[in-house]
Amino acid sequence: MRHRRFSKTMRGLALVIFLTGFTLTGIVPWPAWDTAHAAVTAYSVRGAFLTDLGGAHTGEVTFDDLAPWTDVEGQTVDGIYFKTPWLGCDPYGGSTYRCGTQTSAPLTVITGITGMPATTGANLLSPGGTDIAACSDPSLDNDDLVLHFMEPVSAVGLDVILQIDGGSNLGVRVLGSSGNILYDEPDVQIVMPITPYTGVRFIGFISDTEDIARVEIDEYDEECTGYDAHVGYDSIVYADPLNEEGFTFSPNIILPGTGSTPNSVAIGDVDRDGIGDMA
């Protein structure tokens, strides 16, 4: 895990800068960070992301078909294998994450609550569950997440939901199927006004190589002076390159794993009829 701090003084300066865009609704526009890194373009606006996809996303995980308190740690939902990077040993490896226990667990599906609302439907994913009081349990304050795609995809986007104390920090890394780094931003600073509103930040990526195999999110602001140590995730969308031949995953399939190892199922279009065939 990378440990960095964006000081409250610097947050205040950034806050003053961004308050120049303050509106009557009390919402400050997000700082733009749509940038190209090698073969991957990063997006901070869902609308721009979907526009550039041309409506081609083939999968969506909103957690609304899962019962509250479902633990998706080590499970595959709609072709995405969910993992906390430090809990046990990740069978899919990764560029920086190894074995250990320094993360929020379990990866719990919860019903949206005050300070941690869902962005689609009623449910969202909250590492550590519903205990979101500041520093009530430091073991629940490190809300990292790894998404591993059972089949590489060409694009992925999701909402990151934060409690507000003026700012937050995330590191984001996107890896290809061979473990190559497609995008790496260790310090995505999220600056917000100090208001009762919960912050929602969209993070999305479109790859020119159609080779996104893994997304690693490192949330490292576990300080006790504010609430932004608590992060949730919702409304994950992705584009499967196999969809060019008409293939799509069946919605909300959960394949239980054994320990840290997922129960893999081979899916392909053997007869090229546009329908996925399970081996």
Image (spheres, helix red, strand yellow):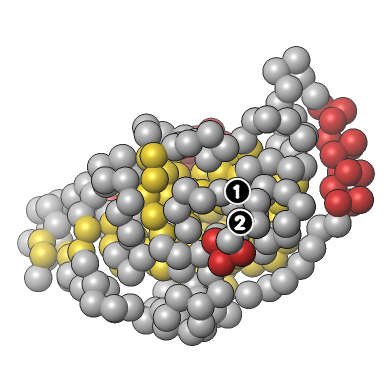
The residue shown at (65%, 30%) is 197
Contact (Cβ within 8 Å) of mark 1 with mark 2: yes
Left or right side of 40 for 89: left
Name the amino acid, label 1: Ala
The residue shown at (90%, 36%) is 16
- Percent position (x, y) of residue 273? 10, 53
Q: Is residue 57 visible?
A: no
The residue shown at (37%, 34%) is 122
Left or right side of 77 for 189: right
The residue shown at (89%, 37%) is 17
Q: Which mark is residue 133?
A: 1
Name the amino acid, label 2: Ser
Q: Can you identify the residue that label 2 sits on?
A: 136
The residue tagged with tag 2: helix, strand or loop?
loop
Left or right side of 171 for 131: left
- Percent position (x, y) of residue 140? 54, 61
- Percent position (x, y) of residue 70? 30, 54
Q: Of residues 69 and 265, which is closer to you in this image? A: 69
